[in-house]
Amino acid sequence: KPDAFYIRPREDKNNIVLAVGRLHPQKRFDLLIDAFARVHAVYPDWRLVIAGHGGLEQILKAQCKDRGIEEHVEFPGLVENPYDYYARAKIFALPSRHEGTPNALLEAMSCGVVPVISSTIEGGRSFVEEGKNGFVFQSGCSESLGEALVRSIQLCQDEPDLYEVYAKRCREVVSVLDEKTIFARWDDIL
C-alpha cells in the first residue's frame, strides 16, 4: 500500500479530533465545535482540526473564539492530500446532517483513525457500529456528540488494546470497498 495508508501506532498519533469536508451547513461543524468546547474543558490537551473550505469559515472561526477555544481549533483549509491529517489524528468525527456515501469517513477508517464518530444519518450508520469500531450520536444533538467525544477520548487514553481492535474493525469494514474487491464484483456481474 502507498505510504499515505501506513497506519501509525496509537502512541504515534496526536490528541486530535479530525473532521474533513466542505464548510457548509450540511456538515454541522458548528455542532462539533459546540461539543468540542464542552469536552475541551475536561480534556484540554486535545485539539480539533477541521480540514476543508467553504462559505462558513469565518462564522466557524468566530464561534471558536466565542467559545474560548480558538487556540485549540485548526482550520487548514482545502488540503490536497488529507492523508497526513488522517495519519496524525486519533479520532474522526462526521457530524453531518445528511450524507450519501461519506468518503471522508471511509478514508479515515482505512487509515486507522479510530474510533470514528458518526451521527445517526443513513450514510454513516452503514459503516459505524456503536461499540464495535466507533460511536454513534443522535443527529443534531450537541450533548450526544459530546458524550461520543468523551467515550472516544477515554478509549484512546485508557484502553490501548480495545483501540487496536477498533482500528482492525474499521479496516475490515472498508476492505469490502477495496478496488480489487470491487473490480472482481464488477467482473462477476459483467
Image: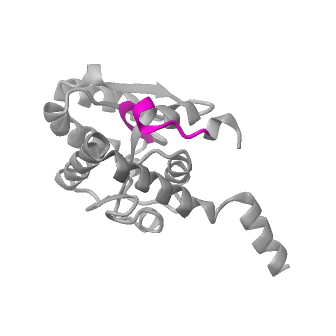
Residue 32: quarter of image:
top left
Q: Position of residue 64 (x, y in %)?
A: 25, 28
Is residue 8 positioned above or below 133 on the image?
above
Is residue 14 positioned above or below 106 on the image?
above
Question: Which of 143/31 is in front?
Answer: 143
Question: Which of 160/185 is in front?
Answer: 160
Residue at 21%, 46% in the rendered image: 150
Residue at 38%, 25% in the rendered image: 74
- Which residue lies most toward the bottom here? 189
Where does the magenta region start and end? 6-19
Q: Position of residue 108 (x, y in %)?
A: 51, 46
Residue 70: quarter of image:
top left
Is residue 167 positioned above or below 74 on the image?
below
Q: Position of residue 120 (x, y in %)?
A: 34, 65
Quadrant in which the C terminus appears = bottom right
Quadrant in which the N terminus appears = top right
Question: Which of 26/131 is in front?
Answer: 131
Is residue 86 positioned above or below 64 on the image?
below
Residue 95, can we see it? no
Residue 136, can we see it? yes
- In this picture, residue 174 sits left or right of residue 126: right
> Is residue 104 within the magenta segment?
no
Residue at 53%, 63% in the rendered image: 173
